[in-house]
Image (cartoon, rainbow, N blue to C red):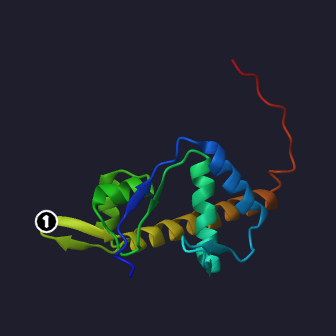
Amino acid sequence: MVGILEERTILPPQEHLRLDAVARLLAAHPTRQAKLVAPSGELIELPSEVYRALREVVEALSQGLAITIAPHNTMLTTQEAADLLSISRPTLVRLLDEGEIPHSMRGRHRRLLLRDVMEYQDCSRAERRVGLDEMVAEGEASGQYDTIEPPGQSR
């Protein structure tokens, strides 16, 4: 029986050599169907989504990065959400007040679902990408990329 998944942060192990070997093996077979060997010796096929997640986790840990695993229905405080979005807490509160990100109130405290924060982050990135593409297109149309000027003198 599987228990309820709670948020868990995993730090990279001290021995990187074994993890590097696992990362290289997984990278060499990015789309292959993987099997897990149970302690009893039984082979269990991993769904492709699980295999992809395993590859990403091992890759991050092999680079010395910590990872956090959390279900999308995890409730976050405003500070946790702000940290995740790399913005200040007051900026996040302004976004909440403007209705940009759904939230609920627990007494006087705002709480956000991780899935809502991740959705806002994805939408925000997509909007920035569109804006940058438009700027590049305008620059190309006006010929700004055609002129090459020598760099100015620095100090």
x then y, percent, for residue 50: 58, 74
- Which residue is pictured at 60% across the width and 78% down the height? 42
Circle count: 1
* Residue nearer the viewer, 80 or 133: 80
147 on left or right of 123: right
16 on left or right of 84: right
What residue does disc 1 label?
Answer: 108
Asked if residue 108 is positioned above or below residue 139 in the image, the reply reads below
The part of the image, by quadrant, that contains residue 70 is bottom left
The part of the image, by quadrant, that contains residue 109 is bottom left
x then y, percent, for residue 99: 33, 73
- Which residue is pictured at 24% across the width and 74% down the height? 104
Asked if residue 14 is positioned above or below residue 155 in the image, the reply reads below
Q: Quarter of the image for the C terminus: give it.
A: top right
Tell me which amino acid carries mark 1: Arg
* Residue nearer the viewer, 112 or 66: 66
Q: Is residue 148 visible?
A: yes
* Residue nearer the viewer, 106 or 101: 106
The part of the image, by quadrant, that contains residue 85 is bottom left
Q: Residue furthest front?
A: 40
Count neighbours of disc 1 (C-alpha within 10 A) and say few if under 14, some if 14 to 19, many if 20 or more: few
x then y, percent, for residue 78: 29, 60
Q: Residue furthest top?
A: 155
- Which residue is pictured at 38% across the width and 82% down the height? 1
- Which residue is pictured at 27% across the width and 61% down the height? 77
Mark 1, secondary structure of its residue: loop
Q: Is residue 45 visible?
A: no
x then y, percent, for residue 87: 40, 52
